[in-house]
Each structure stands twice: as structure tokens, then as C-alpha cells.
Amino acid sequence: MKKQTIIIAMLTILSFLLVTWLPCQADDVLCGCAKIKKGTLRIIDCSSQCLKSEYPVTISGTASQNQNPLPNFKGELCWQITKETEIILLQFYVSHLGSGHYILSGKLYEDGILRNILHGNAELENSNILMTIVNSGKDRKSMYVGISHVTLDSSTLNGEVSNIGHDRDYTEIPLEIGDIYIDSDTQYSSDIITNIQCH
């Protein structure tokens, strides 16, 4: 008796899933209703209505046309910027947050020397990955802060970086009262950024 009840319950659940799932598959759309207060989701036939205490949810199978180049990615990625007199290496730990959203944390090396700490985010937008990077660094005589916008081709992870930064050089003037002379410099640059293997 107990075995029959379990089999009937499983067949009922399977029948319910097939009845609600198959009509949606014809249009590559999955329909459901989510509770406004708790967010509990239930699958419905796409021609059905949600209750007043629910809101409709539609998931389209056509969204997969724009495939995520780094699905569920969590790991290290590196890029190189080659300028006339220096090579800049960006080394990031990247975490995929879901739905094409990424968080970045890393370092900037200039000619092999750690110069700045970096953090930012990246978003998948059509065939591009858009990144915003904030960076800062300090040594004994100066401090640098900057922000960069990066556009990458999602198939190669290569692209363009635009940066604006502000460098403050603190140099002591040998005066009796010990004043500090501050020299400021705002810089803008636009460069090619190339994805490389991290070492």
C-alpha cells in the first residue's frame, strides 16, 4: 500500500511537470509566479495567470544566444599594457556573481614592481565585457589614484583601456618652519590591453 502511494505521488508530480513544462518548451519560454513577500517560485502554463499575491516570471531560452564567455568563472586573469617606456601588468582575481556580473580584486605591476592595488567590477554587455577599475598606490614621495574604463571583446578578452589618474608628489622644501611643497599632476591615457597567461 505504501509503495503504491509513493508511485502515484511520483506519477502525479511527473505529470504536473510535463503538463506545465512542455507547452513552454514550444516557445523556448518557461513561465512562473513568484510570491511577492517570500519570493517562492512555482512553474505555470504560460497561458495561466498569477495570483494577486504573486508576480509573473518569464525565462526565455533565447537569452542563451549571448553566451557568457566566462560562465561561473572564479580564478585569476592577467592583462598587459605595453607603453613606449614601460610594461604594465594587471593581475586580477575574478569572481562571477551570476548573470554576467563579475567582481575584480588585484594588483598593478610596472616593470615587474608592484605599484598599485586594484579593485572593480565587470559586466557582460552583448559581445563586450565592460570593466571599471579603481586603483591607488603610494611610495615615500608620492601618491597616485586613478580610475579606468576597459572594453574587452568577450571572445578574446583583449581590448582598450582609458585611464584618468591624479599623482601628488610630496617633496619637502628645506624651510625652517618645515612647510611641504605639493606638486600635482593629472594624467589621461588610452591604450591597448592584451589578455596574457598569468605567471
Image (cartoon, grey):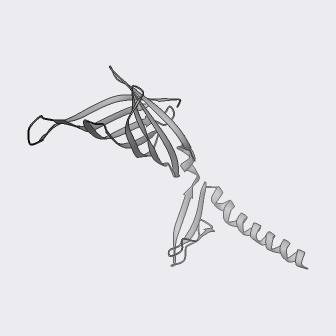
Name the outermost residue toward the right: 1
Q: Residue at (38%, 32%) from the top-left corner?
A: 160
* Between 177 and 55, the one nearer to me in the picture: 177
Q: Residue at (45%, 45%) from the top-left corner?
A: 104
Residue 6 screen position, x and y as percent: 84, 74
Vertical comparison of 127 with 33: above or below = above
* Between 86 and 195, the one nearer to me in the picture: 86
Name the outermost residue toward the front: 176
Residue 21 screen position, x and y as percent: 67, 62
Residue 172 figure quarter: top left
Please state the total of marks drawn on the protein image.
0
Residue 93 screen position, x and y as percent: 50, 42
Q: Residue at (69%, 60%) from the top-left corner?
A: 22
* Between 72 and 118, the one nearer to me in the picture: 118
Vertical comparison of 52 with 186: above or below = below
Left or right, residue 22 beside residue 187: right
Image quadrant occupied by the N terminus: bottom right
Does any portion of residue 124 appear in the rendered image? no
